[in-house]
Image (tube, grey):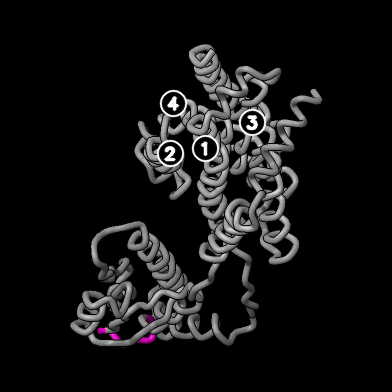
């Protein structure tokens, strides 16, 4: 144990033997993580520009437009029908909304009127706009039924909803779903930053291969297995400091809401750090030069993060890719975080963490085997 601790201290001294290394291994990863959280959490206007053309220009059509505007989700721009097409095509408005000339007449005839929604292509936003529009129109249709399709009575009912004895106080409910998505996306990007930083330290072994450190170790009382374990522990100490700084700055200083206990998030990210360090050592054991290690890093890290859903929500991926994502430790890490954000208890994510640590054990055994072969070859 004393030999192990001596090796760990020597590795830490080499990691931080220059002030620039503090910047490389601590300051830059923390700054990158904080910058990503700011980028994902930067708030922009949530209102959607909608070009509205009311060709009916009736009290009922006005009531529908007013009810849509009162949702607080749209900036209404009143234009003619041709202008609505042009604004959408030029990107000046996200959607166009055209109410036909016979809108009120259709309602008073006991039928459900239709409106024209203009958009560039069909997407989830188009369906969302249609749902809101259909809901507001159905309200008017139901009111017309209650008024027995009498125009004067219907007009009075519309006025009563605005100024009558029944009053409504608008209130805003916090949309935590979008904020959870922001937190999950930012954490996903930080996973890549964390893995890059741990890989960078792990690749120090390549220099030690080239300058003969490993060959000297093979003739010393400390064998390569102990040396590999010491590298893992030293790297984990650095990763723990890095993760702790990120979480403290974001939660305590910047008041970022992770929708889970930051201490639990630290445990989850530290388990991934263990896996990342072991993976970095495994890649280092296969490479003979730093150029090869860089190629292996690019070949493994970016595709695996993409597959795991670090860069975008996994729900947008095809079903076969969703299943394939579980060959990566990042996916199990993100699942554990998502489960905690959904209100599950810590014991319910233990299987996810065990799988992540199983990946770490596999990578460590492969690295130890490779370095042991190197030890025997040099011996």
Q: Which mark is residue 353?
A: 3
Label 4 sits on residue: 286
Element at label 4: helix
Label 1 sits on residue: 203
Q: Looking at the image, tell me whether mark 2 or mark 1 is earlier in sequence order.
A: 1
Element at label 2: helix
Residue at point 46%, 28% (across, down)? 327
- From where the camera sits, is residue 104 visible? no
Label 2 sits on residue: 290
Q: Is residue 275 magenta?
A: no
Cα–Cα span, label 4 and label 3: 26 Å
Residue at point 66%, 54% (across, down)? 258
Which region is colored magenta?
Answer: 55-60
Element at label 3: helix
Q: Looking at the image, tell me whether mark 3 or mark 2 is earlier in sequence order.
A: 2
Quarter of the C terminus within the rendering: top right
Q: Position of residue 356 (x, y in %)?
A: 59, 29
Cα–Cα span, label 3 and label 1: 25 Å
Left or right, residue 224 beside residue 79:
right
Cβ–Cβ under 8 Å for marks 2 and 1:
yes
């Amino acid at each position: 144990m004393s030999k192990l601790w001596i090796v760990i201290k020597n590795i830490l001294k080499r990691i931080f033997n220059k002030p620039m290394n503090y910047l490389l291994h601590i300051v830059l990863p923390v700054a990158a993580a904080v910058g990503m959280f700011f980028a994902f959490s930067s708030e922009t206007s949530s209102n959607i520009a909608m070009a509205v053309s009311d060709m009916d220009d009736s009290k009922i059509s006005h009531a529908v437009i007013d009810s849509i505007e009162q949702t607080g989700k749209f900036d209404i721009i009143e234009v003619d029908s041709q202008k609505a097409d042009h604004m959408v095509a030029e990107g000046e408005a996200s959607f166009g909304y055209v109410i036909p000339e016979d809108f009120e007449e259709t309602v008073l005839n006991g039928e459900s009127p239709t409106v024209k929604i203009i958009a560039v292509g069909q997407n989830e936003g188009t369906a969302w706009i249609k749902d809101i529009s259909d809901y507001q129109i159905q309200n008017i249709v139901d009111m017309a039924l209650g008024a027995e399709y009498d125009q004067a009575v219907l007009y009075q009912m519309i006025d009563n909803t605005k100024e009558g004895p029944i009053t409504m106080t608008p209130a805003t409910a916090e949309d935590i779903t979008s904020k959870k998505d922001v937190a999950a996306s930012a954490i996903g990007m930080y996973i890549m930053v964390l893995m890059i930083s741990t890989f960078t330290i792990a690749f120090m072994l390549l220099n030690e291969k080239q300058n003969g450190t490993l060959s000297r170790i093979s003739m010393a009382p400390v064998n390569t297995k102990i040396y590999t374990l010491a590298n893992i522990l030293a790297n984990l100490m650095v990763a723990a400091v890095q993760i702790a700084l990120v979480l403290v700055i974001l939660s305590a200083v910047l008041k970022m809401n992770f929708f889970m206990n930051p201490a639990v998030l630290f445990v989850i990210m530290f388990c991934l750090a263990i896996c990342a360090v072991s993976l970095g050592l495994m890649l280092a054991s296969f490479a003979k030069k730093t150029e090869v290690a860089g190629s292996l890093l690019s070949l493994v890290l970016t595709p695996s993060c993409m597959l795991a859903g670090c860069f975008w929500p996994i729900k947008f991926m095809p079903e076969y890719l969703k299943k394939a994502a579980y060959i990566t430790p990042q996916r199990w890490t993100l699942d554990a975080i998502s489960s905690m954000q959904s209100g599950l208890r810590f014991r319910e994510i233990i299987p996810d963490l065990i799988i992540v640590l199983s990946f770490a054990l596999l990578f460590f055994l492969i690295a130890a085997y490779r370095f042991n072969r190197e030890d025997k070859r040099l011996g």
